[in-house]
Image (tube, helix red, strand yellow):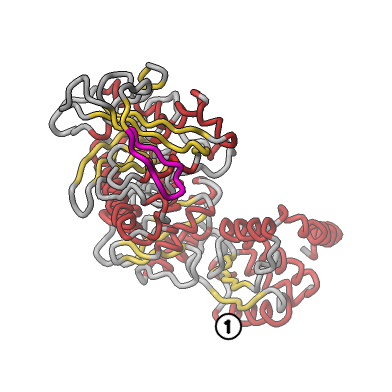
Amino acid sequence: GKFGVGFYSSFMVAGAKGVEVVSRSASLSQDAPYSVWSSDGIGSYTIDSSSSAPSLPQSRGTAITIHLSDETADYADAGKVEAIIKKYSNFVTFPIHLDGERVNTVDAVWARDPGSEKIEDETYDAFYKYVANAYDEPMYRLHYRADAPVDIRALFFVPTYHTEKYGMGHMEPGVSLYSRKVLIEAKSPDILPEWMRFVKGVVDSEDLPLSVSRERAQDSALIQKLRTALTKRFTSFLAKMARKDPEKYKTEFFPEFGQFLKEGVCRDYPSQDALSKLLYFDSSKCENGETTSFEEYVGRCTPDQKEIYYLVAPNREAALNSPYFEIFLKADREVFFVYTAMDDFVMTNLGMFQSRKLVSAEKGEIDLPDDSEKDAAAEAEEKDVAPAAARLTDVQTGELCAWLETEALPDRLAAAKVTHRLSMHPAIVVGHESGAMRRMMLLVNQRTGGEGTSGKLPKQTLEVNPSHPIVVGLHALRERDEDLAVLCAQQLLDNAIIEAGLMDEGGRDMLPRLNEILMRLTAKKDSDI
């Protein structure tokens, strides 16, 4: 180095005899005396001459001898010395010998120029297995050099799999930081955002001082520039891979590492735009098993569509049969199908893509063509869901909604409204948090012992379909048997809550009510039903 920090550190392990340096210039004759510098590190030193130098293996050069203290005698152990050399100086250009054998034998592949020389795949693969302590072959690799905004020599690898999916806990960072091939920080948490922890490799920058690890790296403005440049380069690399071989990206990379990109969308705001373009989801316009991106979705939008719709469901079949999807099917509006709380969280955090707002299909007010709801109601007539004469009038629907709010379900409903977005389902709840998100928040709350999220559902907004036989029948039933009508209203709401994925504990609380309804119905005479 430039400042002798490594040399000065030798006094930290030296004993009373201190450190001795023996040297002779190559320009002097073989008979010239050697210079011997010695110091105990307390504040003084001596320089003597000697006709011999047993510590020098050759007749020229420099030998540094450290007389270890009793407490630091383990630094004379060859195994420990070799481990230190391999950790910090395994890639330095100068050969390092221990007991006559060279220790630093690994080539610093990242320091080679991929633009001017051919580097074999086998060389890359061997280096990946070394730095990642891995046995698999890398799925992708990125090797590049840059001089601005900072000097960078980077070699990144994407493995074929990650270990978090096996329940092995949060992975530690996989990229080490070097300066001039000397290790600054192994598995550095500062040079890449946390969502990139699945990436393995090396970053080397000659702009970094060798003392940066003795400072806190995250306090260095240079480290922040390095982090920004590396993140942008990696996300652009993934975009290139997605264009170059979309099948490999969609079927191999994204199923394995997509969760990390989604984490980045939620936590790395500067990278959010770039990462959102790398995400893929199921969609109502996709064939079963296929996925699509936000950009592909937008490319299929009509000019009048200003929103991007998504629906949270357990699986594709449930999404296609969901009452929330009915109106979108009629309007021929594409809907993303998302199946996990993480996906729902991504949609909520992203909020917008290319000036189009991301909107949950479970939202109360949906901006669709004016005739979409009319079509849904008309379909009910075409399929004879209920005879036209039996459909509720506006007045009857208003009476039923008022009864639901004030008499039947006052403790569970915030509001009851009419909807024409349904044709095959009697009712839905709208404007609520998704079931997946709710379950995730409850789980987090249980694990942390918090009190911020109650297990009890808040009051819901229920929208009823005045054309459905159940709703028509409920209006009539409340005049004949209000107690039974209240039970049916409670069940109607719970059915809608189940459709929304909000029911906890498998709906066991409903069983006594269902038994009561069955008992009342089976006890009635045929003429009363």
Residue drawn at x 57%, y 65% is 428
- Which residue is disc 1 drawn over? 395
Residue drawn at x 27%, y 40% is 180
Is 141 covered by the magenta stretch?
no
Q: What percent of the width, then of the height, locates residue 445?
A: 66, 61
From the image, which quarter does the N terminus lie in? top left
**Which of the two residues, 120 or 131, is positioned nearer the viewer here?**
131
Residue drawn at x 69%, y 68% is 451
Relative to 171, 279 lies left or right: left
Q: For the residue labelled by badge 1, is the local secondary structure a helix, a strand or a loop?
A: helix
Q: Is residue 329 visible?
A: no
**Which of the two residues, 469 or 280, is positioned nearer the viewer here?**
280
Q: Total of numbered circles in the picture? A: 1
Q: Mark 1 belongs to which amino acid?
A: Val
Query: Which corner quadrant of the image does residue 307 belong to?
Result: bottom left
Q: What's the magenta bit mostly, secondary-structure-wise?
A: strand
Is 44 covered by the magenta stretch?
yes
Q: What percent of the width, then of the height, locates residue 482?
A: 78, 75
Q: Is residue 186 above or below residue 226?
A: above
Magenta segment: 36-48
Q: Residues within 10 Å of mark 1 (few under 14, many from 20)?
A: few
Relative to 370, 463 lies left or right: right
Residue drawn at x 59%, y 70% is 390
